[in-house]
Every structure is written in structure tokens, then in C-alpha cells.
């Protein structure tokens, strides 16, 4: 197994969202990993490699940009509109209360 193949497999392992499923997948891959040239040269344990890879991939600007775009694509315009309406309602209510308070103060003169 060369580094390109190893990288692909490590990315697959890192993409597993369920922590316990990921640990099981790492354990299943351990034997094959130990036959890789990378392991033979570095003797780095697979669990350490996966942990470091997760950090490395998380810090990659290209991956961050892709993830941010996915979040943006999944935003519901209805929810955003509803949120903005709610914010507007809160401000309108506060303005009414401030106006009423100002009228009370002005009548005290």
C-alpha cells in the first residue's frame, strides 16, 4: 500500500461520524496498515496517525471552505426569514415600550 492509497483510506476512516464505528474500522484496518511502506518507515501507530490526520484535515483551508459551503447550501431560507421576522418583532416591541416610557416621562413635566 503506497501513500496515496493510505491517504484515501485514512480519509475514509476520518469521515466516519460515529466514534465507535470509526474505532472498529481502525481496528479492522490495522493489519493491512502495518504492511504499508509508511508504517515500515515510521512505525507510527494507526490510532495516532488517524488522530493527527483528523487535525491536519480539519485545518486545511480547502476542506474548511468546502465544509462552510456545505453548511451554506443546507441553510433553509425559510428559517432565516423566520429568524429575521422574529428579530424585527422584538425590536418593534422594544420600540413601543420605549415610546410609551418616553410619553410617560414627557407628561411628568
Image: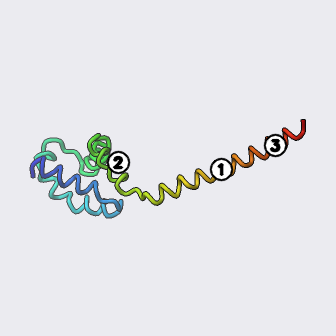
Left or right, 93 with respect to 108, comes to left
Choose between 100 and 2: the one closer to the eye: 100
| N-term-proximal mark, 2 vs 1 | 2
* Separation of residues labelled 3 and 2 (CA atoms): 48 Å
29 is higher (above) or lower (below) than 2: below
Choose between 78 and 6: the one closer to the eye: 78
* Disc 2, SS: helix
Q: Residue at x 27, y 50 (%)?
A: 50
Res 40 label: none
Farthest top residue? 109
Farthest right residue? 109
Choose between 14 and 41: the one closer to the eye: 14
Left or right, 66 with respect to 34, comes to right
Marks 3,1: beta carbons within 8 A = no
Which residue lies under the disc numbered 3?
Answer: 103
Instruction: Name the mark nearer the viewer: 3 or 2.
Output: 3
Q: Quadrant of residue 12?
A: bottom left
Locate residue 98, reporting x and y percent.
Answer: 74, 44
Q: Residue at x 17, y 41 (%)?
A: 42
Q: Residue at x 32, y 49 (%)?
A: 69
Q: Residue at x 24, y 48 (%)?
A: 45
Marks 3,2: beta carbons within 8 A = no
Marks 2,1: beta carbons within 8 A = no
- Residues packed near mark 1 inside 10 Å, few (<14), some (14 to 19) or many (20 plus): few
Q: Quadrant of residue 20?
A: bottom left
| N-term-proximal mark, 3 vs 2 | 2
- Residues packed near mark 2 inside 10 Å, few (<14), some (14 to 19) or many (20 plus): few
* Separation of residues labelled 2 and 1 (CA atoms): 33 Å
Which residue lies under the disc numbered 1?
Answer: 92
Locate residue 36, reporting x and y percent.
Answer: 12, 50
Locate residue 8, reporting x and y percent.
Answer: 17, 53
Which residue lies under the disc numbered 2?
Answer: 68
Amino acid at each position: 500500500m503506497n501513500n496515496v492509497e493510505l491517504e484515501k483510506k485514512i480519509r475514509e476512516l476520518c469521515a466516519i461520524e460515529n466514534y465507535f464505528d470509526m474505532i472498529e474500522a481502525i481496528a479492522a484496518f490495522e493489519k493491512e496498515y502495518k504492511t504499508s511502506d509508511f508504517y515500515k518507515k515510521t512505525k507510527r501507530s494507526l490510532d495516532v496517525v488517524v488522530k493527527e490526520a483528523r487535525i491536519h484535515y480539519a485545518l486545511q483551508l480547502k476542506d474548511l471552505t468546502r465544509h462552510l459551503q456545505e453548511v451554506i447550501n443546507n441553510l433553509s431560507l425559510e428559517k432565516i426569514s423566520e429568524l429575521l421576522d422574529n428579530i424585527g418583532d422584538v425590536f418593534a416591541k422594544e420600540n413601543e415600550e420605549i415610546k410609551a416610557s418616553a410619553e410617560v416621562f414627557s407628561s411628568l413635566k
